[in-house]
Image (tube, rainbow, N blue to C red):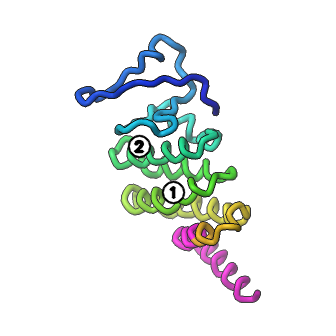
Amino acid sequence: MEIINEATCSTSDSEAVTHVQDFIGTQQAHCYLINHDAHGYAKFVIDERSINALETGLHKIKSSLDRKQIYSMLYDMTISGKVPGVRVLDIINKNTQDAETEDVIVEVYRGILPLIIKKFVPAETLLPTFDRLFKSTYDLMLSGLYKQSISTQELLFTSMIDFAQTDETINIICDIFMTTNDQ
């Protein structure tokens, strides 16, 4: 995804919705990136069309700051009841695999993932969600992208342990420990 057009607007203390005059009467974009470069201070809500585009395209946004902002907005929308926690976890799962920057991985794994899982994921969906998150986190570990950062490796490994809920995933954790002890 690339930014084609930018518009600046001011929000209002008295209006719940801000209309961006630059976009009125133009063709609807594939996705709207709200608060590009993090200059705004407001409660941002991402429209459904943009969420659909971000489900598989968030990782294509070049700026790690913009990606972190989007993850934070999605988390805030989860708190507000505007988007289900499981959907946000799926978006995270689909978009953190393609060489995501370390700062985004740390923010997502340290803050957003645990909070959504703890408070906003129904119990009946936890097991399949944990299984998907375990597999994607394991793939991140195997990728070697973060081998220079011990703290990020520890964060990912701790997350893997938290996500290990099935016999298969627990066995993978045990194998890792056994391999580490053999060396």
Which of pointers 1 and 2 indicates the residue nearer the eye?
1
Callouts 1 and 2 close, C-beta under 8 Å: no
Q: Is residue 164 magenta?
A: yes
Task: Report x, y in % for residue 138.
Answer: 66, 65
Q: Is residue 171 left or right of residue 119?
A: right
Which residue is painted at 72% across and 65% down in the image? Answer: 142
- Farthest residue toward the top? 25
Which residue is painted at 59% across and 72% down in the image? Answer: 154
Q: Is residue 36 left or right of residue 101?
A: left
- Farthest residue toward the left? 14
Categorize mark 2 by other alpha carbons within 10 Å: few (<14), some (14-19), many (20+).
Answer: some
To which quarter of the image does residue 139 belong?
bottom right
Q: Nearer the viewer, residue 125 or 45?
A: 45
| Quarter of the image that includes the N terminus | top right
Q: Which mark is residue 83?
A: 2
Q: Earlier in the sequence, mark 1 or mark 2?
A: 2
Task: Report x, y in % for residue 66.
Answer: 54, 41
Identity of the amino acid at label 2? Val
Task: Report x, y in % for residue 140.
Answer: 67, 61
Q: Nearer the viewer, residue 22 or 126?
A: 22
Q: Which mark is residue 107?
A: 1
Element at badge 1?
helix
Chain part drawn in magenta: 155-183
Please say if 139 is above or below 12. below
Which residue is painted at 63% across and 59% down in the image? Answer: 136
